[in-house]
Amino acid sequence: MAEDREPTKSFDDLVEIVEILRDECPWDRKQTHQSIKDNLIEEAYEAVEAIDNEDFEELEKELGDVLLHVVFHSRMAEQTDTFSITDVIYSIQEKLIRRHPHVFGDETADDEEQVAENWESIKMKEGKQSVLDGIPKQLPALIRAQRMQEKAANVGFDWPEFSQVWEKLEEELQEFKEVLEEGDSQKSREEFGDLLFSLVNAGRFFDLNAEDSLRSTNKKFIHRFQYIEDQLDQENKTLSDATLADMDKHWNEAKKSK
């Protein structure tokens, strides 16, 4: 058994604790990269939630959980002679230096657009076959759509005027209406996807983040729907007892309340 210890602010102590857990804790010994990969995603989203809530005390904790996964995966890799946490640290430093020649080299970049363009150019020189390479397939579809559009825009593939974006959006909406009338489920799904993709693009044109926007709307919907449930409960009604008119009335009250 490991000796009693107190927490410190030392990164090396964190690494040592993870090493001890991998040696002495049955649960930690059992884990693999595959078995805890979803936990890493969960921790990242909990950190995002803390950011959205501007809860910095919680963010501190959630970033610690993310850091734990970085150290844990690194320790598992070290045990199979794949790489170590020091390799991870070196790798990210090397990448940051290499991809910021305007800071650590002789190149210049006058604005963030030039930085983004240089970034894509450097990645292509590193062996990427496409500027779209490197966008994880596991990303939520809205985030992935926005990242693809941003990367394409960084190399000049973008609408020069918003009027063209709006025309494309209206075109996709009309095509979606038409396939719905035809009753073709496969085409409807494809055109719905095209419409969503165009909506993401329209928002991006005004620096609106599609995922953040929809997350905010989801939160708003939950607040308003739960208001309906609370009001019906005070009226001794259930959702199945209430009419649409009843629910709509309370929905409008919720809209006014917040």
Image (cartoon, helix red, strand yellow):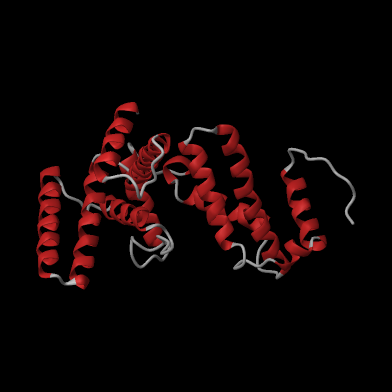
Q: Nearer the viewer, residue 16 or 129?
A: 16
The reply to whether residue 215 is in sight is yes
Against 13, is 69 above or below?
below
**Residue appearing at x 45%, y 50% in the figure:** 99
| Apparent side of residue 73 relative to residue 226 in the rendered image (left or right) | right
- How far across and down, in percent of the image, does residue 234 sit? 42, 34
Residue at the extreme top? 257
- How far across and down, in percent of the image, does residue 135 sit? 40, 60
Q: Nearer the viewer, residue 18 or 247?
A: 247
Against 59, is 120 above or below?
below
The reply to whether residue 207 is in sight is no
Q: Quadrant of the N terminus?
A: bottom right
Q: Nearer the viewer, residue 50 or 110?
A: 50
| Apparent side of residue 175 relative to residue 185 in the rendered image (left or right) | left
- Label total for image: 0
| Apparent side of residue 225 relative to residue 191 in the rendered image (left or right) | right
Q: Quadrant of the C terminus?
A: top left
**Residue appearing at x 45%, y 46% in the figure:** 100
**Residue appearing at x 72%, y 68% in the figure:** 30
- How far across and down, in percent of the image, does residue 24 sit? 83, 61
- How far across and down, in percent of the image, does residue 230 sit? 42, 37
Q: Nearer the viewer, residue 251 or 23?
A: 251
**Residue appearing at x 53%, y 44% in the figure:** 47
| Apparent side of residue 51 relative to residue 151 in the rendered image (left or right) | right
